[in-house]
Amino acid sequence: MTPAKSEAEILEIEGHEVRISSPAKIVFPAQGITKLDIVRYYLAVADGALRGAGGRPMVLKRFPKGIDAEPFFQKRVPENHPDFIDTATLQYARGTSAEEAVIRDAAGLAWVINLGCLDLNPHPIRAEDLDHPDELRIDLDPMPGVDWSQIVDVAFVAREVLDDVGLVGWPKTSGSRGMHILVRIAPQWDYKQVRTAAETLAREVENRAPGLATARWWKEERGESVFVDFNQNAKDRTVASAYSIRPLPDARVSTPLDWDEVRERRPDEFTVLTVPQRFADLGDPHGGIDDAVGTLDGLLRLADELGPAEKPPRGGDGSGRRQSTMPLIEIARTKAKSESIAALDEWTKRYPGVAARLHPADVLIDGMRGSSSLWYRVRVNLQHVPEAERPPQETLIADYDPWEGKVWPGSQ
């Protein structure tokens, strides 16, 4: 019997039976971490993980083929879900709706992990009030070429802005290259107002740390800076919550920190193998987050003071699409990230002299959300290439269409 086909194991968790299929399946080969190890990790940090994701509708991000394959996103809860899994029906912008899973206990954690989930991706709302977020999410997303110390500097600027408007920020590693700062707010504002507040904070951070941080939504305009990603507060967006395992080879974990740890610790310290002992020894640094509920009044007043954010110019072709101010060319659209990297390598071989002039932040590989999975767009910003040497826009090396065959409600 192969490890992937091992017999299912039944776990008794707080009075509920949870079936774990293929418990010996290897999920992280470098460490020999199995599916059952992942379940036991989440049970060890359940109080913290539920503080971040419990009681919230969540998108199920499933990795049925392992961490080296693209996951798929499942909004609708499986029909045969157990009775300890609650649900909430969310309405989406395209006119569709989905009954999403809501977990409330450790058994729920084990159940979603058995489906092939690694990270937990809850909405910033409670199941009892789907229209008013109770969490403002600050996502510090570094551009290529940005190191951890710059992210830390921007985090402390964000903390300063939050202090000035009477809010408390709770930092955590993203589990990848960046950092998240979570803010509990009273559920009194709708998504549009929360996003406005988040964008205002981002703009103020950029004002206070020009060159280090940016609030520019368009990636090619950011340079080597930390993007304060306010759009993570838009409706239907989710982020990996506290104690989520990320699909990186070292089994890295999105880990809550105390502010006095932020300058000293590094994201790669926190993995499936290290975080349970940290949690047992120190508890959850975000243990007080639900007692620090604040108001958006200060940020919304600041929004009025700053005035409307600058909008990009629109193209003159009648499409109404935004016109970039940068000399961009598109290289490829691919289904998998490995394919996008291969396409970029092919383009680099075509134009080695041009590639040598590019700065790290000039290469733009964007994960784009499709109907149920990510796809990847590859672009190059030629701003550092003399105009006479810039290659033209050519036929895409790969041209994957993530919407092929998709039929939208009401389109027929």
Image: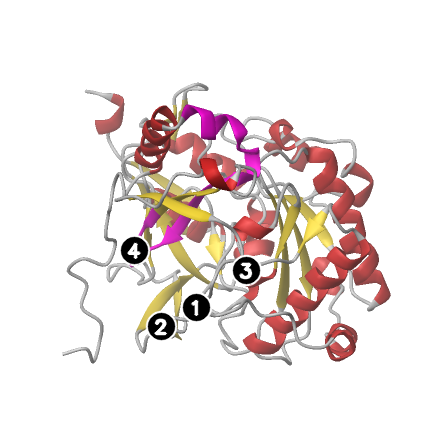
Please tell me the numbered disc located at residue 315: 1
**First-in-chain label (2 vs 3):** 3
Disc 2 versus disc 3: nearer the observer: 2
Q: Position of residue 287 (x, y in %)?
A: 71, 52
Q: Is residue 271 or residue 263 the one in the foreground?
A: 263
Give the SS element for disc 4: loop
Measured Cα–Cα span from mark 4 to mark 2:
27 Å
Relative horizontal placement of residue 332, taking residue 226 as reference (left or right): left
- Marks 1 and 4 sit apart, C-alpha to C-alpha, by 30 Å
Q: Please give the label number shown on residue 10.
A: none
Does 171 sit above or below residue 357?
below
Which mark sits nearer the N-terminus, 4 or 3? 3
Tag 2–tag 1 contact (CB < 8 Å): yes
Give the mark, 1 or 4, whose residue is nearer the N terminus. 1
Q: Amino acid at mark 3?
A: Gln
> Which residue corresponds to mark 4?
372
